[in-house]
Image (tube, rainbow, N blue to C red):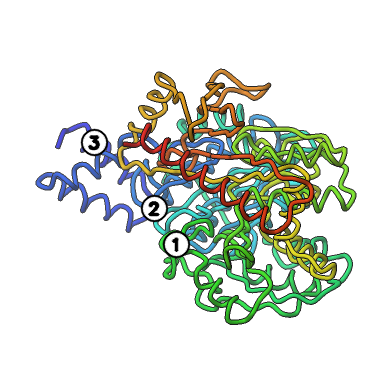
Amino acid sequence: MKEPLDELVSAWISGDVDESDQEELRSLARRAHSDETALTQLKDRFSHRLQFGTAGLRGVMAAGPNAMNRAVVIQATHGLVTYLQAHIDQPKIVIGNDARHHSRQFALDTAGVITAAGGEAILLDDPVPTPLLSFSVRHLEADAGVMVTASHNPAADNGFKVYLGGRMVDDHARGVQIVSPHDAGIAECIDAAPHANLIPRAEGWACAGGELRDTYLQAISQGQRPPAPIRIVYTAMHGVGADIALAAFQRAGFDSVTSVQSQLHPDPEFPTVAFPNPEEPGALDQAIALAQREEADIVIAHDPDADRCAVALEDPRLGWRILHGDELGAVLGEDLATSGCTGVFANSVVSSRQLEVIAIEHGNEYVQTLTGFKWMGRVEDLGFAYEEAIGYCVRPDLVRDKDGITTGVMVARLASRLKAQGSSIMGLLDDLARRHGLYLSSQLSVRFDDQPQIPLTMDKLRISPLRELASSPVELVADLQQGWKGLPPTDGILMKTRRDDQVIVRPSGTEPKVKCYLEVIEPVSPEAGFEELSLVRTRAAERLTTIKEDLSAALFA
């Protein structure tokens, strides 16, 4: 093992604040002298600092600068407070945490650093969903918020997500995740932070929770009672959403809610799922099986920090299935537009083009943004925003971020109203297809163990773009790094065929993946019946499959 690495490890250990992390590094360093695997791990831990960006910090929990641990969190908090204090006096910062391993300790360290630095720290009750943190930043008029969570990442991960508000941003952007130049400014301050054991921490922070929770619940649950009873199956995916979600359903008048008991309570190991993400294959198997036994109308699922919401329904063509994020986005957009929402509708460049059609039909302005609610949340006069990865902002006056809790209540209300009218959410999707054509979306993603393969894959596509997809010539190739229709530059490639099918390829912002977002549009006659719509859906699904095969052969062979 090279001497400079020994010095880096020794310096970090001496500056750490956690004895177990210190011992982990000592053990790894001892083994690294004779174990090549241990040496590789140690080099990775000290190859660079865990990068702070627009998603804050997110990574595996381990000792060392390139991982999530107490020392990294303390330095990150010091950097955040230093940056805020360069702009405002005595910043007020709200802190929340989910139920992952070490989340509460990270939150306590965050509150301690803020307090010692002269800021006003408000620590929320343990644990809370992410939407409540974003709500709290707005409601308490805080200058910033920190949410300790890794959302739907694997159990080994954790994160440090930063929101700005109060005196730091314009009114319409309060409670939205950070963007440039704030992310770069905070990162510079983190890089300049001293060792964690030299950063003071103090007690004396304020606590909040019960009153905020009740205010939030009252706001999202008020309104007319359900016109028709529905049976709901709910799963919290081992996360922190159950208490507040079940209370919200009850307050909104939904009395028949059955929970998946094996996934109801917080469990940082997420024992029943490979990945705690409702989009992952198999994640909702238990919920759907329970819905079949209970003869339920709908399954509503949250990811572990409850900022995302998934819905499963019985499709008369296919049986029980999970709605694609774009399908749920379309029906929510239609519901809000017909209910009188006059604000701007927005979704990201990787989401379905159908929302723009819906907005125009109802006289709403439409805006397309870059990927992420850090962009959609900043749209002025926002009425509704969504992203295909099951993230929905349905009450931007309350939460300028993904809000799975409020979305779940809104979906339940929509299902109840449609049932009272003799229809269903699947029926509404068919009605939208008759009016606009059938928009069908899917995704292809490939995980890379070798991180450098991701930019190489993107370069390969830029140098040799595909000429054809599903036997239709590719007539447009746009490098999103050059900007696109007024959007800022971002790493991605857009391809559109003569048939108007569209593919966008981009690296994931939170995982070591390359993601491909696919959408096909099939014409539908306004009088199409069930059989015709079934045939159209089959054709569209087959074409999506062919496009996936073409992409896989070209990019990932």
Residue 101 is labelled as 1
Q: Residue 61: where, in percent of width, then height?
A: 39, 53
Structural distance between the alpha carbons of marks 2 and 3: 22 Å
Going from the N terminus, do you reach mark 1 or mark 3 first?
Answer: 3
Q: Residue 434: where, in percent of width, then height?
A: 75, 48
Residue 99's place in the image compared with 500, above or below, is below
Q: Residue at x 45, y 32 (%)?
A: 191
Structural distance between the alpha carbons of marks 1 and 3: 29 Å
Are circles 2 and 1 on residues that touch, CB within 8 Å? Answer: yes
Q: Secondary structure at mark 3?
A: helix
| Pointer 2 residue | 61
* Left or right: residue 188 compared with residue 435: left
Residue 193 is labelled as none
Residue 7 is labelled as 3
* Left or right: residue 27 compared with residue 90: left
Q: Quadrant of residue 409?
A: bottom right
Query: Which mark is in front, 2 or 3?
Result: 2
